[in-house]
Image (cartoon, helix red, strand yellow):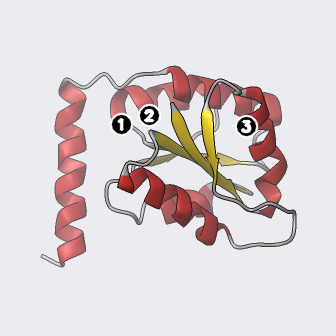
Amino acid sequence: MKIAISSDHTGIDLKALIIKTFSNIEFVDCGPSSTESVDYPDYTEKVAKAVQQGSVDGGIAICGTGIGASITANKFKGIRASLCLNGFMAEMTRKHNDSNVLVLGARVTGDEVSLYIVDKWLSTEYEGGRHQRRIDKISVIENRENTGA
């Protein structure tokens, strides 16, 4: 499994911890590489584009609260980014929403909980079935809104 991962300056330590903890996963580190203040949209965009292009199996984006990275990632066609605050949310967003980007808030979720969230998100499969109808409806809305129709 190959996962793109990024953070802003507030999430750089959590990003490093995730990469170290999940050593069985191939991570593509989309930055940043220092704690110097940066803007989360610049790095979240790199994750979203990697997922869009299919060069990775999914993505993880981290900022202070996760809100900004979530908003940014969901601007990209085909991205279903989910801000998760606990393992149940991570499990359900994979099972029911086929989430392809996990978003974490480094300032609002502790390291131990964040690692549990990542584990749940990485290990849960999409159920399909009745949920696909809803994913298809999201795609229709996304396509309509992007064309202005």
Three-letter residue code for mark 2: Thr
The structure residue drawn at horizontal position 24% and vertical position 42%, both measured from the top left corner, is 135
Three-letter residue code for mark 1: Asn
Q: Is residue 61 visible?
A: no
Q: Could you say whether the residue bearing mark 3 is in a helix, strand or loop?
A: helix
Q: In this view, does 61 lie to the left or right of 77?
A: right
Please identify the quadrant where the C terminus is shown. bottom left
Q: Could you say whether the residue bearing mark 1 is in a helix, strand or loop?
A: helix
Q: In this view, does 7 lie to the left or right of 140?
A: right
The structure residue drawn at horizontal position 73% and vertical position 37%, both measured from the top left corner, is 19
Which of the marked residues, 3 or 2, is nearer the chain's N terminus? 3
**Picture coordinates of residue 114, whole percent (x, y):** 72, 34
**Picture coordinates of residue 144, whole percent (x, y):** 17, 67
The structure residue drawn at horizontal position 23% and vertical position 70%, both measured from the top left corner, is 145
In depth, the one of 102 and 16 nearer the eye is: 16
Q: How crowded is mark 2: few (under 14 residues within 10 Å), some or many (20 or more)?
A: many
Foreground disc of the pair 1, 3:
3
Provide the residue designation for mark 2: 93
Provide the residue designation for mark 1: 97
Mark count? 3
